């Protein structure tokens, strides 16, 4: 007879946290970051990281490839020319996994 053995998987999924400023003003450069980790390890070898950005009341989406900054951080710089509510999805492919967290944010008029 065969003995059954339980196989325990220790592979952890890649976690992605989108970071952006609390206040984003029209026509002001901002940095949007994806912090990518697997367990306690910062992921330095992601195959592809890009942000998909769109205004909430529009159907057109923009995709922008991120630059690897080190320490598991991938980022872009962006200027928004129109105020309103926006969404961003980080598309992260790393270590045979794909993660797509989504975050909502608001762009406000520039202070005068």
Image (cartoon, rainbow, N blue to C red):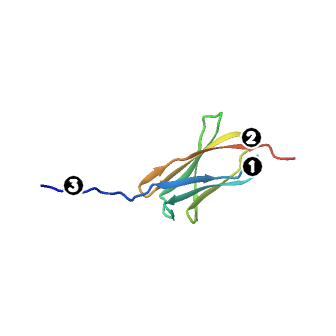
**What residue is disc 1 on?**
23
Where disc 3 sits, the SS reads loop
Q: CA distance from mark 1 to mark 3?
A: 56 Å
Instruction: Please tell me which of labels 1 and 3 falls first in the chain.
Output: 3
Q: Which mark is residue 4?
A: 3
Instruction: Please tell me which of labels 2 and 3 falls first in the chain.
Output: 3
Q: Nearer the viewer, mark 1 or mark 3?
A: 3
Residue 66 position within the rendered picture, expressed as x and y whole percent measured from the top left:
58, 56
Q: CA distance from mark 1 to mark 2?
A: 12 Å
Furthest residue toward left: 1
**What residue is disc 2 on?**
83
Residue at 24% of width from left, 57% of height from top? 5
Relative depth, front residue between 16 and 61: 16
Residue at 47% of width from left, 54% of height from top? 93
Q: Nearer the viewer, mark 2 or mark 3?
A: 3
How many numbered circles are shown?
A: 3
Image quarter for residue 72? bottom right
Residues tagged 1 and 2 counted as in contact (Cβ below 8 A): no
Q: Which mark is residue 84?
A: none
Where disc 1 sits, the SS reads loop
Horizontal arrangement in the rendering, residue 101 relative to residue 109 (left or right): left
Residues tagged 2 and 3 counted as in contact (Cβ below 8 A): no
Q: Nearer the viewer, mark 1 or mark 2?
A: 1
Report crowding for label 3: few under 14, some 14 to 19, many 20 or more residues within 10 A (C-alpha): few
Residue 60 position within the rendered picture, expressed as x and y whole percent measured from the top left:
60, 37
Report crowding for label 1: few under 14, some 14 to 19, many 20 or more residues within 10 A (C-alpha): few
Horizontal arrangement in the rendering, residue 93 relative to residue 22 (left or right): left
Where disc 2 sits, the SS reads loop
């Amino acid at each position: 007879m065969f003995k059954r053995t339980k196989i325990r998987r220790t592979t952890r999924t890649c976690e992605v946290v989108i970071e952006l400023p609390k206040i984003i003003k029209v026509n002001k450069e901002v940095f949007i970051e994806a912090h990518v980790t697997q367990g306690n390890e910062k992921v330095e070898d992601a195959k592809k990281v890009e942000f998909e950005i769109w205004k909430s009341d529009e159907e057109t989406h923009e995709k922008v490839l991120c630059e690897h900054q080190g320490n598991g951080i991938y980022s872009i710089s962006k200027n928004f020319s129109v105020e309103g509510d926006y969404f961003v999805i980080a598309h992260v492919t790393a270590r045979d996994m794909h993660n797509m967290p989504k975050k909502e944010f608001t762009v406000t008029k520039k202070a005068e």
